[in-house]
Image (cartoon, rainbow, N blue to C red):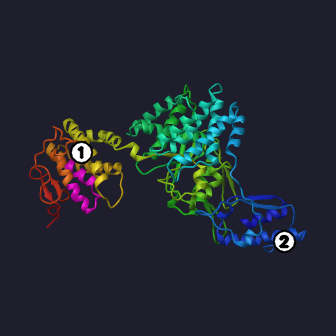
Amino acid sequence: AMGKFFKGLAQSGAWACFDEFNRIELEVLSVIAQQIHTIQMAISMKVERFMFEGTELKLNPTCNIFITMNPGYAGRQELPDNLKVLFRTVAMMVPDYGMIGEITLYSYGFMDARSLAEKIVHTYKLCSEQLSSQSHYDYGMRAVKTVLTAAGNLKLKYTQQNEAILVLRAIVDVNLPKFLAQDVPLFKGIYSDLFPGVELPNPDRDELIELLKVNLEKRNLQATEWYVDKVIQIYEMILVRHGLMIVGETLGGKTHAYQALADALGDLSAKRKAVIKEFKTIFRIINPKAITMGLLYGSFDSISHEWSDGILANTFREYAQSYSLDRKWIIFDGPVDAVWIENMNTVLDDNKKLCLMSGEIIIMSNKMNMIFEPADLDQASPATVSRCGMIYMEPSQLGWQPILDSYKKDLKQRILVEQFELVIELIEWITPPTFGFIRNNCRTFVDTSDLHMFLSFTRMLSTMLEGETQVSTVWLQCVLLFCMVWGFASTLVSDSRKEFDVFFRKLLDGKIEEFPKPKAFKLTKQQLFPDRGTIYEWIYDKRNNGSWISWMDTSPP
């Protein structure tokens, strides 16, 4: 492919700039060095025709080659010496963000551009100094440019609005979604110092929020204030960035967030009198780590040298060439690392072009978005992080209560109303102290979040209730306790299990003052776990009016 490029350049006299040059493999770089050397020698000797890889070419001496490259980090090569000597090195310096911001804001029609540009730059400077260091935080030129773009969009929409409010709204909309909960108060302190007395009006998203709540209800999900805010932040980010990442550990609600948003946007597009004019949304999900690079982007057949398109190439081309007004999202659900995502640098920056090894270049349409859904960005390069908008979703901010609220719907259909109320009361009594004890006093052999543990418990309880038509209240309470032990505390190491055994028995006996035993809980000491051994050694057997039996007794003789 590179040989074809150089043949064309030498004959046409064109200039070419090869971006991200040091991402080419080392063996290929050595061959390229030889090819460039051949062309440069022909130019210096002022010949009209020369031999290039066995082919005689007519030389146009105006041809020239430029390369751009990033310093060495994951997915990058050091240029071999025989290639370095063929190029003159030009080091780029850090640009003057303030001047760029000022000129850009003037071009958008801002009158007080100089002062506002300085405030944007100072905001990022203070954030980089005061906030925690995270792999998905970026305060570089692209971050500044995104704020400027967002401010320009707001200026077009609200021409008479106070300019300081518009710029502050842009800063908050672009940056707030990516911050961890601990950094949000610090960020608010920074911008309130730089924009004293500026109050932000709430953006008018009521129509979208109402439809979003309807779609979350359909999915049996809880529209908590934090979750709805995060979904709206995803929407706001889609408006200003064509590439974005929804980052966060499992069970933070990342997948349902964008899917509920897509459904809500579709419903909104069907409303003729809606204030927010939106479009139906389609998306396609790809797991990039489940397939090879050849299957993802495309590859040449080693024997026939025939090109085969990859999954992404086909999807990207289909969406880019579509004439429909629908929003089109390509979702990458899987870990982000420098190996596969670096090939998308030209897509994610302002070029918006997917460059394939076949030489084909596909331009992204303005209805398309690339959405990545990783758990973290530990393996991502700074080049990738700076190109994407970030929305961080912490499962701890969601909490286990919404999972319980969604589970209630299923539980109501399985047991009597009085039993349902008793079960909910017991769950709300036992869960908080149990999670607190496990977090602060126990060691686990695998790290799990509160949400994982609570979900394990609900699944176990559903399994135990499977096939049961009418259950006694005593059996239900004993099975509930059994499921809590194995749902919440199954990953504890042996020493911690002994400590948890003592704590759990105390809690059930009502000996922990902060969490007194509810009146509805009436199991006697004989009906609770036997004193012999730990609570892990017993399972509740409903035969013989119900009794705790040892695990050993469950195995056939």
Left or right of residue 7, residue 436 in this image: left
The amino acid type of the residue labelled 1 equals Ile
Residue 238 percent location from the top left of the image: 57, 41
Q: Position of residue 289 (x, y in %)?
A: 51, 60
Front position among marks 2 and 1: 1
Residue 297 drawn in magenta: no
Residue nearer the viewer, 491 or 497: 497
- The answer to whether 177 is drawn above or below residue 27 in the figure is above
For label 1, count other residues whose C-alpha is less than 10 Å away and answer few (under 14), some (14-19) or many (20+).
some
Residue appearing at x 70%, y 49% in the figure: 95
**Label number found at residue 430:** 1
Assign a secondary structure to mark 2: helix
Would you place residue 348 above or below residue 337 in this image? above
The stretch in magenta equals: 479-501
Query: Which residue was labeled with disc 2?
Result: 41
For the N terminus, give its image quadrant.
Answer: bottom right
Disc 2 residue type?
Met
Quadrant housing residue 213: top left
Residue 499 colored in magenta in the image: yes
Q: Which mark is residue 93?
A: none
**SS class, disc 1:** helix
Is residue 149 among what the camera can see? no
Left/right of residue 251 with respect to residue 553 in the rendered view: right
Q: CA distance from mark 2 to mark 1?
A: 80 Å
Q: Residues within 10 Å of mark 2 (few under 14, many from 20)?
A: few
